[in-house]
Amino acid sequence: MSERESMDYDVVIVGAGPAGLSAAIRLKQLAAEHDREVSVCILEKGSEVGAHILSGAVIDPKGINELFPDWKDKGAPLTVPVTENHHWVLSAKGKWGMPHWAMPPFMNNKGTYSASLGNLCRWLAGEAEALGVEIFPGFAAAEILFNDDGSVKGVATGDMGIARDGTRKPDWQPGMELHARYTFFAEGARGHLTKELARIFELRKHSGPQVYGLGVKELWDVPADKHKPGRVIHTQGWPLTDAWGGGFLYHQANGQVALGFVVALDYANPYLSPFEEFQRWKHHPAIRAEIEGGKRVSYGARAINEGGWQAVPELVFPGGALIGCSAGFVNVPRIKGSHTAMKSGMLAAEAAFAAVSEDRRFDRLDSYPAALRSSWIAKELKMVRNVQPAVARWGSTLGTLYAGVEMWLGSFGISLPWTLKHHADHTSLRRKDQVKPIAYPKPDGVLSFDRLSSVFISNTNHEEDQPIHLTLKDADVPITVNLALYDAPEQRYCPAGVYEIVEEAGSPRLQINAQNCVHCKTCDIKDPTQNINWVVPEGGGGPNYPNM
């Protein structure tokens, strides 16, 4: 500890996603409006801002409209308005288009944009730096720092140059401590520090568990005659039989199509592979017609919050706050969360600025959750709070019908008096002797691909001689429990080929290929005994998404 240097700020933000960047920008805007100095820094574990950002994305500009009303004049990369909106229910060979009149009004994507969320974050970072925000990419927040009274003091970055055996390499550098009056955690879904904060401060004492989906995404260059900028397609149904979820296909700028598949992680069959379901989905005639003749140029995967309003934890604790997907503000049926993430960051910034102006530090920013509860975030999420648990409970057909009725009622200001509950995703797996294995077709290398070639085009890289960041609480559990009862489901739910069962001296052993990890967090979520604990690797490691 004595070897670390420290830096002091008014606000430190962990994560340069939409929430963290919006919070930093809003703090600087308020400082300029009130002729004050407020020091703000952002830590970003990716090699650059946007390197770890992965989303569909169809972006509702509601958040950026409030942050930068003149964002168009400033050159924000939202240039492709949605012009077509389709929702297809797929069978094995056909499709049925859900009519627009049957869709709740806010599901029509009117006024939204098809874009790269990573590029939007890069643009926001430039605006933040122009306002005086200090951004440190390639530095991972590895540890929470506490004051003697238990309040959050800040964070420390991880040491650089630690060998796999824990010894210091010749290029070793100690981490840096960043102290702040208030620390915002904007790590995204299933943040490793956020998980620790939830335990220490009992942030889920009055909320249900967060639940997740795994989103697997590719970016394709398609022939000019197939490209229709602003065309948006969502699908449900085939190929899923053992889970619920669906696909998306968005025509973006520059002749590119973003397509992907989301599988809810409460599925029961341990033989299911979200990655393989996605590869199979691309062979549907309707999907094939959108991308055939094109070339896959990028790949990625990320867990998505799906718990909605009833899974939002306590947002504040002494010295800090949760914003964006660290708290879980995704609107599940709309498949959108960037606008709510940005708004949450702005609301937290306003609370922190008021506190700093009063020379406060390390206390609870209670005005932030109060403001959020009265904001359009709360209104939007309360309206759809029962959609995910309804589909999870009653299946795709009945659950969708129920969800549609409730969303239509909500559009008329009618709120039903009950809230459906969730169960944690890791509790849902059935034993291997209770289910049938799923036979997935081999990839053809044209539309469908294997994991390793996919990881290659995600530009994922980790320094190999560093401690494995996918840690096991008990090294025996993968064989005695996971393999014995569930046939090692980590081999299938991981979209990057990190986990393998290999034979060693005639006995099975779990091999962890940590260098393949795309930081999706699925293993931390889905492992049935919660034995896998994802901790942050060296800063700058992981995927490097160029345009995702």
Image: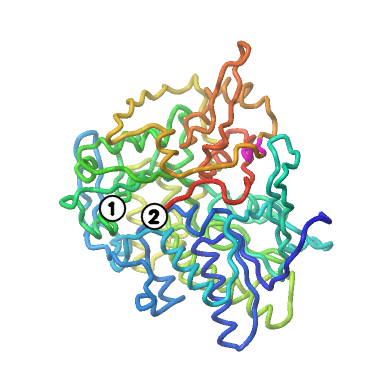
The picture places residue 97, in percent across and down from the top left corner, at: 20, 49
State the residue at coordinates (58%, 41%): 524
Residue at the extreme top of the image, as rendered: 506
Tags 1 and 2 touching, CB below 8 Å: yes
Q: Where 264 falls versus 359 (above or below)?
A: above
Which of the 4 image quarters holds residue 168?
Answer: top right
Q: Where 117 falls versus 476 (above or below)?
A: below
470 is within the stretch colored magenta:
yes
State the residue at coordinates (72%, 54%): 175
State the residue at coordinates (22%, 46%): 290
Kind of residue at badge 1: Gln
Give the distance between the C-alpha atoms of the residues marked 1 and 2, in whole angstroms: 10 Å
Residue at the extreme front of the image, as rendered: 170
164 is within the stretch colored magenta:
no
Label 1: state its secondary structure: strand
The picture places residue 382, in percent across and down from the top left corner, at: 46, 62
* Segment tinted magenta in the rendering: 467-471
> In the image, which disc is placed on residue 547?
2
Q: Nearest the camera: 357 or 168?
A: 168
Which of the 4 image quarters holds residue 73?
Answer: bottom left
Q: Which residue is mark 1?
A: 256
Left or right, residue 224 beside residue 457: left
Q: Which quadrant is home to the N terminus?
A: bottom right
SS majority, magenta: loop
Q: Where 491 falls versus 305 (above or below)?
A: above
Neighbor class of circle 1 (other Cα within 10 Å; few <14, some 14-19, many 20+) is many
Q: Earlier in the sequence, mark 1 or mark 2?
A: 1
Q: Nearest the camera: 376 or 279?
A: 279
Kind of residue at badge 2: Asn
